[in-house]
Amino acid sequence: MSKIKFVDANGEISFKELDIQIVQNFKLQKELLYKMKLARAFEEKTNELYATGFIHGTLHLAIGQEAAAIGSTAAMTPEDKILITHRGHIEAIGKGMSITSMFSELLGKDSGASKGYGGSMHMIDPDKGILHANGIVGANAPLACGIALALKKQKKDAIATCYLGDGAMNEGAYSESLNLASLWQLPVVFATVNNQYGMSTPIHKSHANTDLTQRGIAFNLPTIEADGNHVLTVYCAMKLARAFALKNQPVILILNTYRISGHSRSDKNRYRKDSEILAWKKRCPIKTLENSLLEQKQINQKDLEKTDFKIKNKINSAIQTAQLSELAKEIQW
């Protein structure tokens, strides 16, 4: 089982075992499996709706990244706040957002998350702690600092988590935010979902140092790194990161995973070899947890079939409700 890598602010490296109580908590694991399967089904159905002309604009799917999103959001409390990216559907699902509201937004309906005006990249639900989502790479970082500052001043027992990709680490706003968070000792986690590519550029062609855990040292920040395809490892890593943030120690969280789906729906995947994609498919986070629970006789094939049937009905019901909703109202300028 994966260990969690911890790099302190001075660059000293240590490794932490997973919490045995989490490893043996099969109720939690079944919940994580359900949420990952729901997230995957949502993305696949969204892809289908886009291909058949029901969804307009652009679309960035996160198929393959389910463990990073679901494992980290599951380790949060309802009071914790998150900021998500252009590829943020599954983090929104993990934090409890209604998939009916999400489908409604994708279809441009008034009942959507952003009243039908925002589309795929603007899934926002303040009641669930999803305070911001946009398509500007790296823009979440300074906003997360502002939210974390508000939480600190209000003495809230909560943190802000800023989701970013590996590409966003090269944006100036990211480094500025690390500096600000460290100076002001803000309760914030910079959760970097390293899916190996910034659009079509692999990290070894965009990062002078591909060891992303070294980035925080210059800002006197600790970094936690975990296997982003192993949901229990992600869960434990986020628990650790959250504990630091609650003590007003900002922290970087690196979750190493892979984007099976292309950068966007226009991506032909010409920059990746089929063998590479296949190798990562074999590390599917959903299959990994499924197989673990099957081997430990915590579930059986009939349980999986029931879960898949339940999710299929949930997805279809949400789409039907969304399709029957009114279109977004015309804006009067």
Image (cartoon, rainbow, N blue to C red):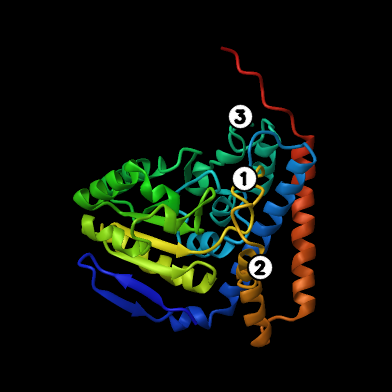
Label 2 or label 1, whichever comes before in sequence order: 1
Say which of 84 and 307 sits in front.
84
Spatial separation of the CA atoms under disc 2 and disc 1: 19 Å
Name the spot of residue 225 as percent of width and height, x first: 39, 68
Residue at position x 56%, y 50% from top?
92
Image mark count: 3
Q: Residue furthest bottom?
A: 296
Q: What is the C-alpha distance between the residues marked 2 and 3?
A: 37 Å
Of the residues shown, which amino acid type is indicated by label 2?
Leu
Q: What residue type is labelled 3?
A: Tyr
Give how far across and how far down residue 315 sits, in percent.
75, 52
Q: Which residue in the structure is indicated by mark 3?
A: 117
What element does badge 3 sit on?
loop
**Numbered badge on residue 264:** 1
Proximity of marks 2 and 3: CB atoms separated by less than 8 Å: no
Which type of secondary structure does the marked residue at label 2 adopt?
helix
Crowding around mark 3 (Cα neighbors within 10 Å: few <14, some 14 to 19, many 20+) is: many
Residue 86: % across, % down? 54, 43
Amino acid, disc 1: Ser
Q: Nearer the viewer, residue 126 or 108?
A: 108
Residue on which the image places disc 2: 278
Q: Which of marks 2 and 3 is in front?
A: 2
Task: Point out the frontmost of discs 2 and 1.
Answer: 2
Q: Do the residues labelled 1 and 3 touch (CB within 8 Å)?
A: no
The extreme top residue here reads: 333
The answer to whether residue 171 is left or right of residue 312 is: left
Name the spot of residue 282 as percent of width and height, x first.
Answer: 64, 73
Q: Please determine whether, in this image, residue 291 is positioned above or below residue 9.
A: below
Question: Quarter holding the C terminus?
Answer: top right
Residue 158 seen in this snapshot: no
Q: Which residue is drawn at 30% across and 58% down?
A: 215
